[in-house]
C-alpha cells in the first residue's frame, strides 16, 4: 500500500487493507471470515485486549497452554469462548509479531499450532451455528491468514 489511505473508521481501514493484501497474496476467504478478521483487528488495536488482569490490576499475557488447560475445565459455553480467544490471540500474535517470536522460547509455529487447534475445536463444537464455517476456514487457512496479517 503506497498511497495514503483515508478512512472514516478503523474497521473500514482494516477491511480495505485485508482485501488488498489477500488479493495480492491470492488468499481467498468467505466474506464473513473477512468480517471476523476486520473485527478481530479492530478489537486488538486497543492493546488492552491482548492482556489479562489479575486481582491487583497487573496486566499480563496468559500462556496459551494454560488458556487451553483452563478451557478444558469449563462448561461448554465458557470453553467455546476461551478457545475462541486462544485462536484469536494466536492468530493476532503470529500475524503481527512473528519476527519477534523467533527469539522466544516458543516460536511462531507454536502459535500457529495452538491457534489452528483451537479454531478446529470451536468449529466442531459449534457445528450447528452460523459461524462454524468461519472457524473451520480459520483452522484450514490459518497460516495463509497469518501471512495476510
Image (tube, rainbow, N blue to C red):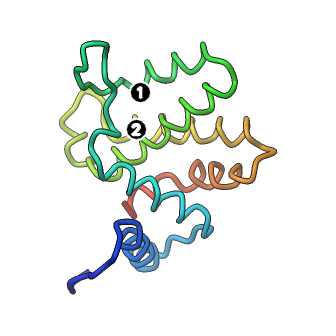
Coordinates of residue 20 in the picture (x, y in percent)? 40, 78
Q: Mark 2 points at which residue?
A: 111
**Contact? badges 2 and 1 (CB < 8 Å):** yes
Q: Nearer the viewer, mark 2 or mark 1?
A: 1
Vertical position of residue 83 compared to residue 47: above or below: above
Q: Mark 1 points at which residue?
A: 64
Question: Dot 1: within a 10 Å radius of its alpha carbon, few (fewer than 14), some, or many (20 or more) residues?
Answer: some
Coordinates of residue 93 in the picture (x, y in percent)? 33, 44
- Give the residue at x 24% y 26%: 59
Coordinates of residue 77 in the picture (x, y in percent)? 67, 28
- Give the residue at x 27% y 43%: 47
Q: In which quarter of the image is residue 41?
A: bottom left
In the rendered structure, find residue 133 and report the number of the disc placed on it: none
Residue closest to the far bottom: 3
Which quadrant, please, contains the C terminus?
Answer: bottom left
- Helix, strand or loop at mark 1: helix
Which quadrant, please, contains the N terminus?
Answer: bottom left
Amino acid at each position: 500500500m503506497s498511497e495514503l489511505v483515508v478512512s472514516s473508521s478503523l474497521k473500514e481501514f482494516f477491511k480495505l487493507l485485508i482485501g488488498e493484501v489477500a488479493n495480492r497474496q491470492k488468499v481467498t476467504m468467505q466474506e464473513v471470515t473477512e468480517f471476523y478478521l476486520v473485527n478481530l483487528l479492530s478489537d486488538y488495536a486497543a492493546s488492552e485486549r491482548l492482556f489479562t488482569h489479575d486481582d491487583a490490576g497487573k496486566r499480563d499475557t496468559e500462556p496459551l497452554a494454560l488458556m487451553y488447560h483452563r478451557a478444558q475445565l469449563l462448561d461448554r459455553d465458557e470453553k467455546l469462548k476461551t478457545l475462541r480467544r486462544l485462536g484469536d490471540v494466536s492468530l493476532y500474535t503470529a500475524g503481527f509479531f512473528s519476527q519477534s517470536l523467533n527469539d522466544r522460547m516458543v516460536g511462531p509455529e507454536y502459535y500457529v499450532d495452538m491457534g489452528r487447534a483451537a479454531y478446529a475445536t470451536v468449529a466442531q463444537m459449534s457445528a450447528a451455528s452460523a459461524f462454524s464455517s468461519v472457524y473451520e476456514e480459520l483452522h484450514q487457512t490459518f497460516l495463509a491468514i497469518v501471512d495476510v496479517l
